[in-house]
Image: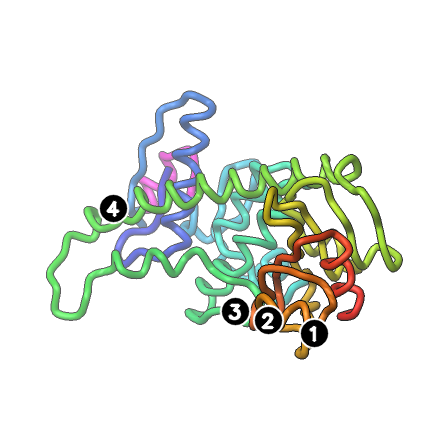
Amino acid sequence: MAVHDGMFHADDVFCVALMRKLAKVCDFELKVYRTRNPQLLQAVNLRADVGGRYDEMSLDFDHHQKDERMEQPEGIRHAAIGLMCHWCMDDAFYSVFKDKYILGLEHQDNTGKPHPKYSSIGFAIQPFLPAYGEEADLNEAFEKAVAVAEIIFERCLVTVEGIIKAEEELPEAIVESLCDGQILVLNKRLTLWPPFHKNLAFAIIPVGKRGYSFLSFNNHLLKPNLRGLKGEKLKNVTGYSGTFTHPDGFTGTMDTLEGVKEICLRSL
């Protein structure tokens, strides 16, 4: 595998992290070359973020050339990591992984700035770049960055696997659906993926001896007069006893299911 030499970026770092994950899963040896040498690029089996070509059949994953396939519906140009994830992930998994982790990284790589909607795991790589006035071996720094990126990438994969599993278990976990699905009462906590539930405002879950909590979705929050309440003040305002409602209105815990349903219903 080859990536470009010189200053590295989160894009090429995460491409190598992805391939090292695949190497472990598929049990093959992976050698990584940081180069722009045309002869060496030609000799390796896969090129990422270098080479000026995108072709899954030849295992070329560069995004710097003019190619309409680099443009995405979200208005973010592809980076090499997005092209590689599309190549090796099934469509359902890639759809969630892209939205949650890759779009923000691609935007960062192409603009150097954070995206207002999509967060980027790539900013974790910046501290591994040489600081001003620091003499550093770029290849050594690159390896340190990849080692951290592998850990991050592994956790991202696990998180998305959990989201997919939660969506599969959701039908059996629904105890009650209120207001055309705007409020769901569940028998356990599930990691729901908001883009799959655009109508969902609140999910209510049991929290053992503490009663029931709610989690907000799609920017739905408690009404301002219901936020930041505790103990007696919470009971006085809502008519139900509970532990707290968060000052920002995105979560809270009530003693009874009736109580938490009431504050969620009031906030639709």
The disc, 2 or 3, on the residue closer to the chain's N-terminal end is 3
Q: Of the residues shown, which amino acid type is indicated by label 1?
A: Val
Which residue carries the number 3 mark?
A: 115
Disc nearest the viewer among 2 and 3? 2
Is 16 magenta? The answer is no
Residue 196: horizontal and vertical position, in percent? 74, 51
Q: Name which quarter of the figure residue 224 lies in.
A: bottom right
Label annotation for residue 237: 1
Q: Of the residues shown, which amino acid type is indicated by label 3?
A: His
What span is in magenta?
38-47
Gap between marks 1 and 4, in whole Å? 54 Å
Residue 5: horizontal and vertical position, in percent? 28, 52
Label annotation for residue 229: 2
* Vertical comparison of 235 with 149: above or below: below
Residue 252: horizontal and vertical position, in percent? 61, 61
Which residue carries the number 4 mark?
A: 144
Q: Look at the magenta stretch and give its main secondary structure.
A: helix
Name the secondary structure under disc 1: helix
The disc, 2 or 4, on the residue closer to the chain's N-terminal end is 4
